[in-house]
Image (tube, grey):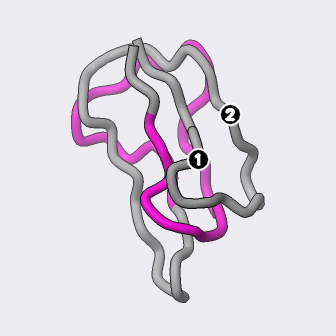
Amino acid sequence: MKTIKAPLDGYLTSMNVSAGDVVQKGQVLAIILILKMENPVLSDRDGIVREVFVKKNSRVKHGQPLIRID
């Protein structure tokens, strides 16, 4: 299991996956707006999304869990 966490404080503008989705290494999972710049959150492995911890249009803090991948 791997938990993908927010790299910095920001605003989650897009969540591109949901529980049960199959993802590949390098796939864009979400977009976080940080300092007026869109920053993609990428998967670092192939796997299946088991849980999404945050909703689109919410604030996130550095290190906050976003997605769990098996």
Q: Secondary structure at mark 2?
A: loop
- Quarter of the image for residue 29 reads top left
60 lies above or below 26: below
Q: Quadrant of residue 26?
A: top left
Q: Which region is colored magenta?
A: 4-31
Residue occupying image coordinates x 55% and y 14%? 50
What whole-number distance in Å separates the C-alpha atoms at marks 2 and 1?
9 Å
Quadrant in the picture for the C terminus? top left
Camera-nearest residue between 43 and 65:
65
Question: Callout 2, which amino acid?
Answer: Phe
Where is the N terminus found, in terms of image quarters? Answer: top left
| Pointer 2 local density, CA inside 10 Å: few below 14, some 14–19, many at least 20 | some
Secondary element at tag 1: loop
| Image coordinates for residue 37, horizontal then vertical, percent | 47, 83
Q: Tell me the tag on residue 64.
A: 1
Residue bearing mark 2 = 53
In the rendered structure, which disc, 2 or 1, sits on the residue that comes first in sequence? 2
Residue appearing at x 31%, y 40% in the figure: 27
Taking depth in this image into account, of 19 and 4 the one nearest to the observer is 4
- How far across and down, in percent of the image, does residue 52 sit? 64, 30
Question: Disc 2 vs disc 1: Cβ atoms closer than 8 Å?
Answer: yes
Question: Which residue is most to the front?
Answer: 63
Nearer to the camera, 16 or 5: 5
Name the spot of residue 28 as percent of width and height, x first.
38, 47
- The residue mark sitting in front, 2 or 1, is 1
Residue 54 appears left or right of 48 = right
